[in-house]
Image: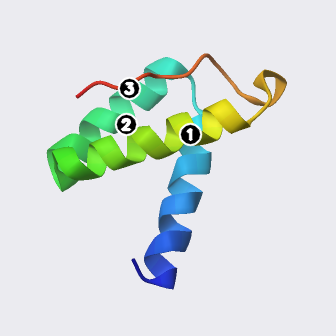
Amino acid sequence: MDTAESCRHACEVRWCLAQSQTERAAYYQLVLKHRGKEAANRLIASVNELRRATPASTQSAAGQTGLF
């Protein structure tokens, strides 16, 4: 993955984590529709990884375990 794509992905992951669980699930559906299952699963995995590494007090809602 190139540097620009890595930066975009990291930003998207942080943005997703800041959303509520409902908003995240809706966004994951959009990613699935427009970028495919592999991209959606990669995003979900990255968000969950960051969620586990981030103190709960800095998260907006409980994490999503995956939809696909």
Q: Residues within 10 Å of mark 3 (few under 14, many from 20)?
A: some
Query: Can you tell which quarter of the image residue 67 is in?
Result: top left
Which amino acid type is marked by label 2?
Answer: Tyr
Callout 2 secondary element: helix
Q: Residue at x 40, y 46 (%)?
A: 43
In the rendered structure, which disc, 1 or 3, sits on the residue that comes first in sequence? 3
Specify the quadrant that holds the C terminus. top left
Specify the quadrant that holds the N terminus. bottom left
Looking at the image, which is closer to me, 68 or 27? 68
As drawn, 56 above or below 36: above
Measure the alpha-carbon separation of dots 2 and 3.
Answer: 5 Å
In the rendered structure, which disc, 2 or 1, sits on the residue that comes first in sequence? 2
Task: Name the residue that disc number 3 marks.
Answer: 25
Which amino acid type is marked by label 1?
Answer: Glu
Callout 1 secondary element: helix
Residue 32 position, x and y percent, is 21, 42
Task: Name the residue that disc number 2 marks.
Answer: 27
Q: Nearer the viewer, mark 1 or mark 3?
A: 1
Query: Can you tell which quarter of the image residue 19 is in?
Result: top right
Q: Residues within 10 Å of mark 2 (few under 14, many from 20)?
A: some
Task: Name the residue that disc number 1 marks.
Answer: 49
Question: Can residue 67 be seen by looking at this rendering?
Answer: yes
Q: Which mark is residue 16?
A: none
**Tags 2 and 3 touching, CB below 8 Å:** yes
